[in-house]
Amino acid sequence: MKVTTDACLFGAWVAEEMKNDKLKIKNVLDVGAGTGLLSLMFAQKNPSAVIDAIEIDEETYQQAKENAESSPFAKQLYVINSDVKSFSFSKKYDVILSNPPFYVQDIKPADEKKSIAHHESGLLFEELLRVIGDNLSSDGIFYALLPFKRNQHVKNNFLQQDLSLSKIVFVRQSTRHGYFRMMLAGRLGKSADTETSIEEISIWDDQQQYTDHFKQLLKDYYLHL
């Protein structure tokens, strides 16, 4: 599977948020882990964390498992091949992170694996929120990367699942583009009055160079920044 720049940005942002909040993390769940990118980035910055990475697709799971086992963080990572909707977790998680399916209403591709990976035929957005609500510890925090087009409905969807948003970061491909992704952080507890911090970041500047903000977040992961 292709590693996308926005997924790398999301992983680096989560790590930075964890550092700034100075949270003590033990158990982490990566929902829809893909090839394990987010789990590996998280492990790099959190050597004491134990990360369960769950992926439904067999072939992708095998790649994630191989990536985990060949990494310096193999003892921290446990890759699970299962459907998160039916899997019975034995513990609550301090952190749940997910880069869930995109393109809910768009035309689905012919390839069935891509259909599951990039649409909600495998995991509906509301189902993801229920997974978060059911498995997040009482003082835990969740992170999600979503398409910007969900912006009009996202807060109500979270409130309906007894979740609240503490931060939204809107993401531009470049300073010349509009928003195309948003990175979310939140917790358990429903409150329509919860104040949500709003920020933004651009990946590229108007000269097609990485922005200083992007480089600061990714410098520990990219070799040539």
Image (cartoon, grey):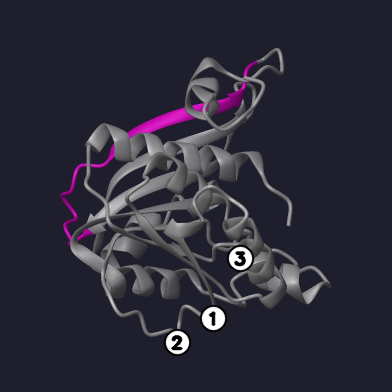
How many numbered badges does the structure rendering display? 3
Q: Which mark is residue 125?
A: none
Say which quarter of the image contains residue 61.
bottom right
Contact check, label 1 and label 2, Cβ < 8 Å: yes
Classify 142 as above or below 52: above
Tell me the crowding category of disc 1: few under 14, some 14 to 19, or many 20 or more residues within 10 angstroms, Cα based: some
- Helix, strand or loop for disc 1: loop
Residue farthest top in this picture: 207
- Residue drawn where x is 45% and y is 58% of the image: 75
- Helix, strand or loop for disc 2: loop
| Quarter in which the C terminus is drawn | top right
Question: What residue is pinned by disc 3?
Answer: 65
Q: Earlier in the sequence, mark 3 or mark 1?
A: 3
Tell me the crowding category of disc 2: few under 14, some 14 to 19, or many 20 or more residues within 10 angstroms, Cα based: few
Q: Which mark is residue 86?
A: 2
The mark closer to the camera, 1 or 2, is: 1
- Distance between the alpha carbons at the discs numbered 3 and 1: 13 Å
Question: What residue is pinned by disc 1?
Answer: 82
The mark closer to the camera, 2 or 3, is: 3
From the viewer's side, name the closer residue of 94 and 207: 94
From the viewer's side, name the closer residue of 96 and 186: 96
* Kind of residue at disc 3: Lys
Residue 113 within the segment the image draws in magenta? no
* Kind of residue at disc 1: Ser
User: What is the span of residues highlighted in magenta in the rendered image?
Assistant: 188-205
Q: Earlier in the sequence, mark 2 or mark 3?
A: 3
From the viewer's side, name the closer residue of 201 and 104: 201
Tell me the crowding category of disc 3: few under 14, some 14 to 19, or many 20 or more residues within 10 angstroms, Cα based: many
